[in-house]
Amino acid sequence: MKRIAIIGAGMAGLTLANELKAFADVQVYEKSRDYGGRMATRCRNNYQFDHGAQFFIAKTPAFKEFLKPFIQKNLVARWDARFVELTGNDVTYRWTWTDEVPHYAAAPSMNSLGEAMAKDLPVQLETHINEIKKNGQQWQLIDIEGKVLGSYEWVILAIPAKQVIELVPDECKFNKDVAEKNMSACYSLMLGFKEALPLEWDAALVKETNISWVCNNHSKPGRASHYSLLIHSTNQWAEENIELDNEAVTKFLIQETSAVIEQDVSVAEHIDMHRWRYANIQKQYGDRSFIDNSNRLAAIGDWCIKGRVESAFLSGLDGATKLKQLL
C-alpha cells in the first residue's frame, strides 16, 4: 500500500485518515498536544473551556450518519441551550434549542470527538511539520528541528489555507486557488467564577459590539459543574488587532463583555485568552478539496466550504473519495 502523510489532526484530517486507512498506510502529524483542531478544549484550575468550535449542526445525510455511533455512545449529545440574540445588551430574540433543530456538542469536552476518531489511527502529536521536500518520487517531511520524519508517496495538508501555501512548492497546481481562501482571526476569552452569574440564558449571539458570542460552557452536556464563561471576539476586531499583546486583548474583551452582559467579569477567579489566527471563513464555492495528482499533494479543510465542523467533515470525505479513485 502507498504511504500517505496527513498533516493536521482536526476533523478534516481525521475524517480523511479513517476513510483511507483500509486503502493506504496512513500517518497523521499534528503540531498541537491534542486532537480535534479548532474543536478544542482547555482545562485550567477546575474550569473547562471549549475555546474553539462551540457546537455543530448536522444538515447533510453523510454527517448525520457519521454522528450516529458517537451519539449512541454519548460522545456526542444534544445541547438544549437557552439561546438569545443580543443587540448590544438588549435581548432581541429567545429560543431554547430542541430536537427540532438539534445542536450538538461533543462530550464530555469538544475535543472528545477528535480523540475518539483518532483511536485506531497512527497520530504523532506535538510534531510541527516545517517543510515538505521532494526526494525522487517521494516526499520527505521535516519537522521544526530539521529532523526527517519519513518518506511518503502522498502528502495531504489538513491545515489552514495560509499554512498550506507556506508548505507546498510553487509548482503545486492548486496554489492559486488555495491562496485566495482568506480565513479570519478570532480571540477567545475564558473566565472561571466561584459563583454563577445571574444570566437567564446559556448562549448568546451578540451583535453591534466587538464580541460575537458568550456562553456558559458548563451548560453543555457532560461538562464540569464549575461556572465558566467563554467569549469570542468578532472576526473583524480580531483581524484589526491581531498583533495586540495578550494583556491588552484580555483587558479590552473583559470590558466589552462586562458592558454586554451587565456584569463585572473582571472579578473572575480564572482568566485566560487564546488567539486564533485562522478561525473562520464565509461560504465558499467550488471544490470541496484540492488534489494535485501529478505532484501527489492534496489540501482539505473547512475553509474549502465554510467555517463549520460539518464543512471540515465534508471536505475530508470529499478528499478521501477522490484519493480512493487515484489509489
Image: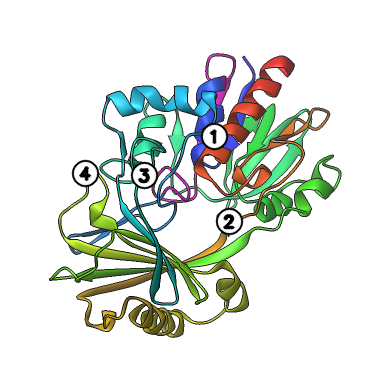
Alpha carbons under labels 4 and 3: distance apart: 13 Å
Q: Residue 280 carries which label?
A: 2
Residue 148 picture quarter: top right
The residue mark sitting in front, 1 or 3, is 1
Q: Earlier in the sequence, mark 1 or mark 3?
A: 3
User: Is residue 80 placed above or below 136 in the rendered structure?
Assistant: below
Residue 222 is marked as: 4
Check if residue 36 falls in the magenta segment.
Answer: yes
Q: Is mark 4 on a helix, strand or loop?
A: loop
Mark pair 2, 3: CA separation = 18 Å
Q: Name the residue under label 3.
A: 111
Residue 29 visible (yes or no): no
N-terminal of the pair, mark 4 or mark 3, is 3
Give the number of the mark in front: 2 or 3: 2
Counting the numbered discs, the total is: 4
Name the element at disc 1: helix
Residue type beneath disc 3? Asn
**Residue 15 place in picture, x, y as percent:** 52, 30
- Residue type at mark 2: give it: Asn
